[in-house]
Image: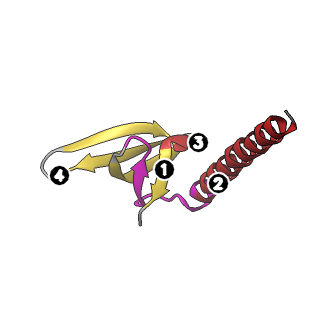
């Protein structure tokens, strides 16, 4: 009976460690993006859209995406940026 409790405690500890680590990595990434995001930066959103930052206003920004002939402007929240590509 004690073995089951030990296994359950180990599993709870593992899941706690994984969830805290993911939170810390996401927080670190968000801080990096906020500090290094500039106009003309190429970004990748969490939904997979690649675009170039055209303007920034507080918590939102406008990116341009698409080809030279067919541009789309999207206004998104800074928290939706997954990574800075350039």
Q: Which residue is mark 3?
A: 58
Q: Which residue is mark 2?
A: 25
Q: Which residue is mark 1?
A: 82
- Left or right of residue 79, residue 4 in this image: right
Front of the two marks 1 and 4: 1
Determine the secondary structure under disc 3. Answer: loop
Magenta highlight on residue 50: no
Residue 77 vertical position relative to residue 67 in the rendered view, above or below: above
x then y, percent, for residue 51: 34, 51
x then y, percent, for residue 53: 40, 52
Residue lying at 58% horizontally and 42% vertically, measured from the top left: 58
- Earlier residue among tags 2 and 4: 2
Q: Which residues are magenta?
A: 33-47
Question: What is the spatial separation of the Cα atoms under label 1 and label 2, in whole angstroms?
Answer: 12 Å
Question: What is the spatial separation of the Cα atoms under label 4 and label 3, in whole angstroms?
Answer: 27 Å
Answer few, some or many: residues within 10 Å of disc 2's Cα (few below 14, many 20 plus, some between 14 and 19): few
Front of the two marks 2 and 4: 2
Q: Which residue is mark 4?
A: 67
């Amino acid at each position: 009976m004690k073995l089951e409790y030990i296994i359950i405690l180990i599993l709870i500890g593992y899941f706690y460690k994984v969830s805290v680590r993911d939170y810390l990595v996401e927080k670190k990434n968000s801080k990096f993006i906020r500090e290094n995001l500039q106009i003309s930066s190429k970004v990748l959103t969490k939904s997979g859209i690649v675009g170039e930052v055209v303007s920034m206003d507080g918590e939102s920004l406008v990116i341009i995406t698409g080809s030279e002939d067919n541009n789309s402007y999207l206004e998104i929240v800074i928290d939706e940026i997954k990574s800075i590509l350039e």
